[in-house]
């Protein structure tokens, strides 16, 4: 993934479109989007930037990581906090993720 311009505040829509195209090209259908493991080996720069922008605790991150790829892509593209610069968005993020989970019909849920 290489955005047309670097230094933008938000790459989520561009990245989501890119991931969908990659998933469709690789499988012939659907998106292949999965949350990486936390830590220094994380390779997805956009997801790293997302969680730097919206820090969450490990529990909220694991909740996200266990969600279906389509739900992850929706959260990644649509989550926005009313106020940025907070130290922890875990509660707000988890509430939003639960609403996305509830609104996604026909997706197998593997989280608790």
Image (tube, grey):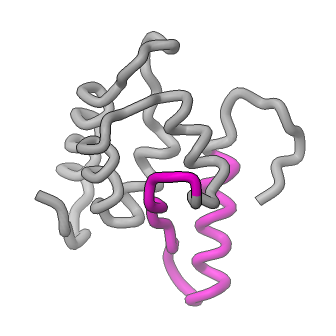
Q: Which residue is outermost to the front? A: 40
User: Which corner quadrant holds the N terminus?
Assistant: bottom right
**Image-based side of 7 in relation to 55, left or right:** right
Is 66 included in the stretch rendered in magenta?
no
- x 63%, y 60%: residue: 43
Q: Is residue 19 above or below residue 88?
A: below
How far from the left and from the top, in percent, is residue 72?
40, 55
Name the residue: 55% across, 28% down: 53
Q: Which residue occupies 53% across, 83% down?
A: 29
| Residue 35: x %, y % from top left | 45, 60
- In percent of width and height, residue 75 lies at 41, 45
Q: For the view shown, which residue lies furthest in the right direction? A: 5
Residue extent of the magenta highlight: 13-40
The answer to whether residue 52 is above or below residue 85 is below
Q: Is residue 61 left or right of residue 77?
A: left
Counting from the top left corner in percent of width and height, residue 51 is at: 50, 38
């Amino acid at each position: 993934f290489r955005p047309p311009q670097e230094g933008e505040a938000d790459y989520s829509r561009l990245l989501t479109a890119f991931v969908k195209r990659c998933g469709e090209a690789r499988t012939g259908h659907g998106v292949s989007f999965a949350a990486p493991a936390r830590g220094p080996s994380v390779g997805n720069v956009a997801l790293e930037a997302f969680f730097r922008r919206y820090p969450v605790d490990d529990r909220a991150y694991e909740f996200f990581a266990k969600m279906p790829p389509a739900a992850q892509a929706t959260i990644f593209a649509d989550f926005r906090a009313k106020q940025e610069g907070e130290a922890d968005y875990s509660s707000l993020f988890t509430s939003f993720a639960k609403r996305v989970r509830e609104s996604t019909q026909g997706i197998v849920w593997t989280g608790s």
